Amino acid sequence: MNYCGLNKNDIANGDGIRISLFVSGCRNHCIGCHNPKAWDFNYGKLFTEETENEIIEALRPSWIQGLSVLGGEPCEEEKEKALIPFLKRVRMELPDKDIWLYSGFTYEMLQCYEILRLL
């Protein structure tokens, strides 16, 4: 999985001060999309263990409320292999942090996705 942005001091994508991860790749191509560059699955940098560690450390301070995952489209099937273990790690290591996920899919469309059970 690639990601195209990481904001470690975000107040625009959820409640409080957050860490925001912008993942690459989206097939929805919504009209008026604010981030069409992120439609390309190969855009940006590779999401690695080092990236995970960087995000975990950025989440640790008490003034950080949580993690927001945006895109691109975080719920594209290809991203599950990277995102689900990472979000489980966030839940295990930082249980007091909330996780927000912005998707172009409806809640009903996402009911079968394991990722929803982690939010």
Image (spheres, rainbow, N blue to C red):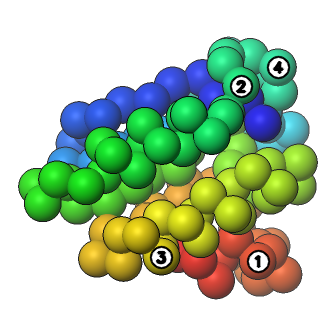
Q: Is residue 71 above or below residue 103?
A: above
Q: Quadrant of residue 28?
A: top right
Q: Which numbered disc flags the more N-terminal residue, 1 or 2?
A: 2
Structural distance between the alpha carbons of marks 4 and 1: 24 Å
**Residue 84, percent across and down?**
70, 64
Horizontal and vertical percent position of residue 31: 69, 32
Q: Which residue position holds label 1?
A: 114
Disc 3 target residue: 92
Q: Is residue 36 visible in this depiction of the protein?
A: no
According to the picture, the residue beneath numbered tag 2 turns out to be 46
Of mark 2 and mark 3, the one earlier in the sequence is 2
Residue drawn at (28%, 76%) of the image: 96
| Residue 3 or residue 40, whichever sits in front | 3
The amino acid beneath tag 4 is Asn
**Of callouts 4 and 1, which one flags the residue occurring earlier in the amino acid sequence?**
4
Q: CA distance from mark 3 to mark 4?
A: 29 Å
Q: Along the horizontal axis of the image, is 78 left or right of 117?
A: right
Query: Which amino acid type is shown beneath numbered disc 2?
Result: Leu
Query: As shown in the figure, which amino acid type bears the numbered disc 1?
Result: Glu
| Circle 4: element type | loop
Dot label at residue 42:
4
Nearest to the eye among marks 2 and 4: give it: 2
